[in-house]
Amino acid sequence: MDTTSSYFVVKKKAVPEVLLKVLEAKRLLETGRAASVHEAAEQVGISRSSFYKYKDDIFQFHDNAQGTTITLSLQMEDEPGVLSEMLKIIADFKANILTIHQSIPINGVASLSISIQVLPATGDVSRMLEAMEGHRGVHYVKVLAKE
């Protein structure tokens, strides 16, 4: 399996602890709460070699999302207002809706895909997805593509 230039979107709970610690070390360095890689690695409890091994391969989803198009797959209850509430969340985070495709609901459940454009003013995309996923009537929200 060739993964030389592939990207994956993985929920935080599926990411190994060492990678999360590398992210935290990078955050410490960016904010100035750590003056060196040695200090940042020590604060989060990883080796410098672990930091250097993964630092270029792990980043917050929002950090690299600006200016991109994200296609989402959603499954939700076919009830008045649920789709409208999803669109309001996207608007509240100041993302631009490019396309919406909805299938005919089956057994009271609607499946749809939404493509959104992440703008400079768009809030944290991860938080937007969490808000959508945690909303009443939503079964799941998945990222299908990031271009």
Image (spheres, helix red, strand yellow):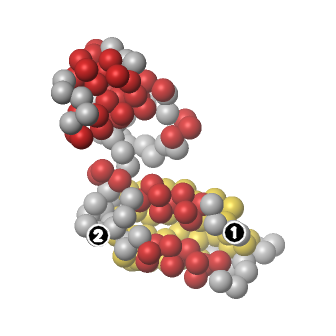
- Image coords of residue 128 (percent x, y): 47, 63
Using the image as rendered, state which of residue 136 and residue 35 is in the foreground.
35
Neighbourhood count class around disc 1 (C-alpha, 10 Å): few under 14, some 14–19, many 20 upward: few
* Residue furthest out toward the left: 35
- Image coords of residue 14 (percent x, y): 55, 35
Residue at the image position 22 percent from the left and 23 percent from the top: 37
The reply to whether residue 144 is visible in this rendering is no
Question: Residue 20's image quarter?
Answer: top left
Using the image as rendered, state which of residue 64 and residue 72 is in the foreground.
64
Residue at the image position 36 percent from the left and 33 percent from the top: 24
- Image coords of residue 110 (percent x, y): 68, 73
Mark-to-mark CA distance, 1 and 2: 26 Å
* Residue furthest out toward the front: 33
Residue at the image position 29 percent from the left and 70 percent from the top: 121
Instruction: Give the labeled residue for mark 2.
Output: 121
Residues marked 1 and 2 touching at CB (< 8 Å) = no
Instruction: Give the labeled residue for mark 1.
Output: 136
- Image coords of residue 28 (percent x, y): 28, 34
Q: Is residue 112 above or below residue 48?
A: below
Residue at the image position 47 percent from the left and 58 percent from the top: 127
Mark 1: which amino acid? Answer: Arg
Which quarter of the figure is the C terminus placed in? bottom left
